[in-house]
Amino acid sequence: MRPISNHRALLITALFGLAAHFCAGQTQAQQKTVSIFIVRHAEVDASQPTIPLSPVGRQRAELLAPTVDGVTFTHLLATHTTRARQMLEAIAAKQGLQIVQLPAPGSVFDGELVTDQTSRRASIEPVAAALLNLPPGSVALAALNSENIYAILNRLGVPLPEPGETCVAGVMCVPCLDNKCFPPEFDRMWHVVLEPGRATPLTFVELRYGVGWQASER
């Protein structure tokens, strides 16, 4: 896969237009694949116990909805955190879909009640399993956290770099399995296409949405 330049990163709208075309007119081969979009939650208000999206984060979430406008999703998934769920609420309302949070808030996971204070790592296995078990033809959007995105991508077949090597833009690779190497920006997205029987994704693209966007004062 060729590296993605900064100029190409600005073409995310066009890329989502292609994704919309993918969803609207799938070929027989595409109907056997699973298309997954993964997004990090936006900026948060850490002063509140539930750590919800901040005013800037809510504006970024509002920006996400028109970014994926035209893509018809079949599944919306989020981690157990409030901030992840909030990223998808506008899209869920528009497309009439339920947001499935994993593990479910209020449920018992590893012997403890799931709350916003539950480790974000707790979502890795349940979210990855749910994505890997989506039926062919599914188009999913998952809102995740920096602590679990790379690990979940790895569970989907995106490999770590070989010893002594590093990930470079445009290459199918995750640099680590936690958030120690995660970029600080909140505008990162990934598109993964899975094909049954294939160990690595058919497609793996890292995207940035709203490049150059500035939050307004409210």
Image (cartoon, rainbow, N blue to C red):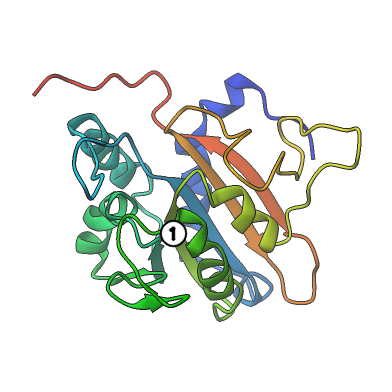
Vertical side of 162 occupied by 36: above or below: below
Asked if residue 133 lies left or right of residue 157, the reply is left
Q: Quadrant of the C terminus?
A: top left
Furthest residue in direction left, as rendered? 218
Q: Is residue 73 visible?
A: no
Residue under the point 42% across and 33% down: 186
Q: Where 200 falls versus 170 (above or below)?
A: below
Q: Which image quarter: residue 67?
A: top left
Question: Is residue 139 in sight in this rendering?
Answer: yes
User: On the picture, is 148 further left or further right than 68?
Assistant: right
Amino acid type, callout 1: Leu
Q: Give coordinates of residue 199: x percent, y percent.
A: 80, 67
Q: Secondary structure at mark 1?
A: strand
How far from the left and from the top, in percent, is residue 190? 56, 46
Q: Nearer the viewer, residue 17 or 183?
A: 183
Figure quadrant of the N terminus: top right
In the image: residue 22, left or right of residue 48:
right
Q: Quadrant of residue 205?
A: top right
Residue 209 place in picture, x, y as percent: 43, 34
> In this view of the protein, which residue sits in the foreground, 65 or 142?
142
- Name the residue at 73% across, 76% down: 196
Residue depicted at 38% across the width and 44% down the height = 41
Residue 143 at x, y percent in the picture: 41, 54
Label total for image: 1
The one of 217 and 33 positioned closer to us in this rendering: 217
Q: Residue, x 60% and y 58% (percent of image)?
A: 152
Residue of label 1: 141
- Residue 56 drawn above or below residue 66: above
